[in-house]
Image (cartoon, rainbow, N blue to C red):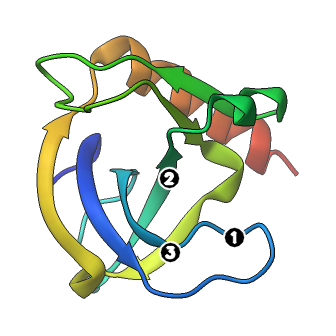
Amino acid sequence: MKKGDICLINLEAGLGHEQYGQRPAILVSNINSGIVSVIPLTSNMEALRFPFALAILPSQQNKLQTESVALVFHLKSIDQSRIIKVVGQTDRDTKQKINKMLKELLEL
């Protein structure tokens, strides 16, 4: 697994507006400590109203089944055992947009 992979993950529980259940997510850190950082995806296109959300269209490369929204503002660290499988890979343009959003989001 590597940065930019789209993985199916299991987020068993969530409270309030947290993402939960099995869902695709974009891996944004390499695995080296057993903990990885991911950006959950949703098929709810209304999520684009939030800042730090990015639309991603299905492609042969990313293997998504539906139009999705990367919830960059929901950046989450999880144990690597929550990763079920790798399903695809983000393209260079999407990686660049996500990196830019992450930098803006984490700017102190």
Residue at 16% in and 31% down: 63
| Precedes in sequence: disc 3 or disc 2 | 2
Q: CB under 8 Å between callouts 1 and 2?
A: no
The residue identified by callout 1 is 18
> Residue 86: x, y in percent?
13, 54
Q: Amino acid at mark 2?
A: Ile
Residue 32, visible in the rendered structure: no
Give the side of residue 97 with respect to residue 17, left or right.
left
Residue that carries the numbered disc 3 in the rendered image: 77
What amino acid is at disc 1? Glu
Tag 2 or tag 1, which sits nearer the N-term? 1
Which residue: 64% across, 82% down?
A: 14
Residue 91, relative to residue 42: is it above or below?
Answer: above
Q: Is residue 13 shown left or right of residue 22? A: right
Q: Which residue is mark 2?
A: 39
Badge 1: few (under 14), some or many (20 or more) residues near its Cα, within 10 Å? few
Label 1 and label 2: CA atoms lie apart by: 12 Å
Q: Secondary structure at mark 3?
A: strand
How far is the residue under mark 1 from the one under mark 3? 13 Å
Dot 2 falls on a residue whose secondary structure is strand
Tell me residue 17's x, y (percent). Answer: 77, 67
The residue shown at (69%, 70%) is 18
From the viewer's perspective, is residue 92 above or below residue 89?
above
